[in-house]
Image (spheres, rainbow, N blue to C red):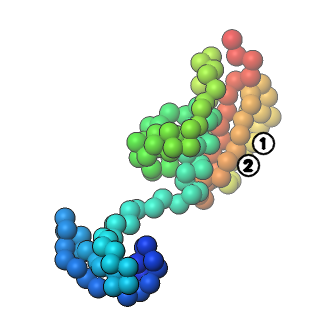
Amino acid sequence: MEILACPKCKTNAIVKSGVINQKQRYLCKKCNYYFTVNKLGKKIDDYYVTKALQLYLEGLSYREIERILGVSHVTVSNWVKEFRIKRLTQGDYHPTYKIFSHLELVEYLKNKDQLSGAGMIITELGDKFMLIKWERFKD
């Protein structure tokens, strides 16, 4: 990784100035500021963050979200904390979900019995579709 500019004064008059904790240290010749470069972590696409938070709000557990999206349940938990997401406390139902290809989804929706008496949401999930369904007026 090459440093292009000083983080303090934004000049490119920098030189290497030793190593600290296995990280290269730099010195800005203009402002005499010493700095090291932080390692850039793995960045997960915002699409997965949004989908994970949507699924969390729909009532899926962290582990279920992990199995569906392939993102660690700890990461999903951290996103929920970071964005201060609060789920409604309704313990009287737990949604069920199914993952379909386009043709499977069309066949599923053709049956009118599948559509009555339940609320449902269909969301895109990569090249597949997820149908989240919960019983209406369940006691």
Give amino acid for label 2: Val
Q: Position of residue 107 (x, y in %)?
A: 72, 46
Residue at horizontal 48%, vertical 59%?
Answer: 44
Residue at horizontal 30%, vertical 73%?
Answer: 34
- Determine whether 127 is above or below 64 in the image: below
Foreground residue, 46 or 8?
A: 8
Residue 130 in sight in this render: yes
Q: Are marks 2 and 1 in contact (CB under 8 Å)?
A: yes
Foreground residue, 85 or 8?
A: 8
- Determine whether 77 is above or below 34 in the image: above
Which residue is tagged 2? 106
- Determine whether 1 is above or below 109 in the image: below
- Determine whether 111 is above or below 6 in the image: above
Q: Is residue 27 left or right of residue 121?
A: left
Give the CA separation, mark 2 to mark 1. 6 Å
Q: Position of residue 35 (x, y in %)?
A: 32, 71
Q: Quadrant of residue 86?
A: top right
Q: Is residue 106 left or right of residue 97?
A: right
Which residue is tagged 1? 110
Q: Is residue 23 left or right of residue 134?
A: left
- Mark number, residue 128: none
Foreground residue, 111 or 116?
A: 116
Q: Residues within 10 Å of mark 2 (few under 14, many from 20)?
A: few
